[in-house]
Image: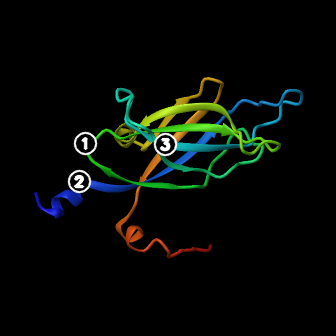
Amino acid sequence: MSSDDEKSLTTTLQLRLHASKLPRLGRITKTPPSTFAQVLFVGGPFQKDAPPQEWGSTEIIRKFCHPQWTTVLTTDYEYGTAKYFFVRVMRHHKSHPETPSLIGSALFEIGDILASATHTKVKRLRQGGCLFAQLEFVRQEQQEDSRILQIQMR
């Protein structure tokens, strides 16, 4: 197999995350939580011995039950391989920023998301709310020079 054939079997993907209807966790006032997401690559549900690898984290969205994180995570994907990632939605504590608490988590498989019509999958979180994972293909021009910012004004 030549290197051109191998390149055609791989692609670069961007992951975008958002959540909806996250539970209000304030004890007295039921204020919306300040949240962020941590993303880890895992071996899959049947490979318990493989250690997870950190993919990245999103920024903190302050006091909102429907966060749309703007951080975009990029990865290379080889078609036909099972590649799983685990997303943890964490609550950021203003008084204890070093110890976030878990709101919910979900396991996604990249091939499963790409097989859907909208390249989006939704998972329900146990404590309430939903987590959306959307994958987008990175165009070749974006891969070659990602430093160019294009702005279109209307």
Q: Is residue 51 above or below residue 138?
A: above
What numbered label is drawn on residue 80? 1
Q: Alpha-carbon neighbours of circle 3 within 10 Å: few (<14), some, or many (≥20)?
A: some
Who comes first in sequence, dot 3 or dot 2?
2
Q: Is residue 152 above or below residue 52?
A: below
- Could you tell me residue 136's position as x and y percent? 43, 53
Local SS, label 3: strand
Q: Which residue of the protein is positioned furthest toward the right in this rendering?
A: 28
Disc on the earlier residue, 3 or 1: 3
Q: Quadrant of residue 33?
A: top right
Q: Amino acid type of disc 2?
A: Leu
CA separation in Å, label 3 and label 2: 23 Å
* Amino acid tagged 3: Leu
Front-lying residue, 124 or 98: 98
* Figure quadrant of the C terminus: bottom right
The three-letter code of the residue at mark 1 reads Gly
Q: Which residue is mark 2?
A: 9
